[in-house]
Image: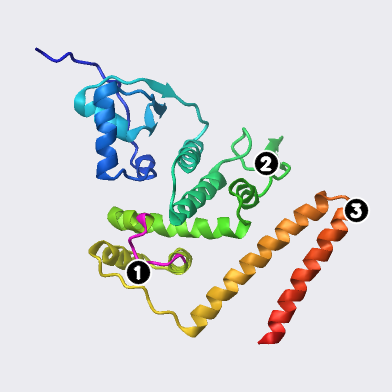
Amino acid sequence: MEKEKYELPDIIIDDEFKALLPALDEQTYEMLEESILENGCLHPLVVWNGVLIDGHNRYEICQKHEIPFKVVEKEFDSREEALIWIITTQVARRNLTPIQLSYYRGLHYRADKQIVSNKTGINRQEVVGEQFVPQPKNEKTAGRLANEYNVSHMTIKRDAQLAEAIEAIGETSPEAKREILSGTANISRTRLQELAASGTKEEIKSIAESIEQGTYERPKKSPDDIFQSVLESLNGAIAKMAEVYSAQIQAAKADEAAQLKAALREHIKKLENLYRSF
């Protein structure tokens, strides 16, 4: 019996968007394929201007077996907004590893910074006659995303550096990027942030190739490196504590604010006692 032919919609695959999606392991992919073969493609694919932004594995399976599927069209004002939608969808949907979550937060921050905030296309400005008139500043990106993801604004900034380094490594070796995000590459967050801040193209290429070949070894930390790492962690913890107390004190009533200030003073005393113990 001749198989019925289906006209599948023309869909564009964008390599950058596709690379944002964690690859399925072989067993999970096979289970998805069996489900689609048995039940059809139950969930519609999501596209933006004909570009696939959600459902790459389903699309691949449907193409392979000529299985019809539905399509939902999303509307965004820019590529960056589409990218942010992909990121937030993945964060909400998947159980991500810590480094994957940091990577997505960093990409979100970088994309958000690229979006202009008014219709004239000039960030926080508008044209009046021949003059540029500054518009009221929006809440800072790092602070807004910190609230959204429940982390400190410095964590968002560090995540942006990490994402920048991973993207640079991925340009040389997509496999090295995959290993970093899967957690199999033995490279530290601190090293990735250093590469984003001051790494040369040659250095990034060398590290990417060594990760892909399985020869990368994490450098041993010197006493200075260990001290700096501890100091950064301590600074981050203090900054986060200050943000939490500041927000709570400002929102509290007078008597509650006094109690919060007293609790903060106790924390400060503990730090002072710790300092004296050294």
**Circles 2 and 3: CB atoms closer than 8 Å:** no
Position of residue 98 in the picture relative to residue 216 (left or right):
right
Q: Circle 2 is placed at which residue position?
A: 125
The residue that appears at 56% across and 55% down in the rendered structure is: 156
Residue located beneath label 1 in the image: 203
- SS class, disc 1: helix
Which of these two is toward me, 243 or 212? 243
Secondary element at image label 2: strand
Spot occupied by residue 194 in the image (x, y as percentages of width and height): 46, 68
The segment highlighted magenta reads: 182-189
Q: Nearer the viewer, mark 2 or mark 3?
A: 3
Which of disc 1 and disc 2 is earlier in sequence? 2
Quadrant occupied by the N terminus: top left
Earlier along the polypeptide chain: callout 2 or callout 3?
2
Sort mark 1 into few (<14), some (14-19) or many (20+) by Cα contacts within 10 Å: few
Q: Position of residue 44 (x, y in %)?
A: 38, 24
Residue 254's disc number:
3
Q: CA distance from mark 2 to mark 3?
A: 39 Å
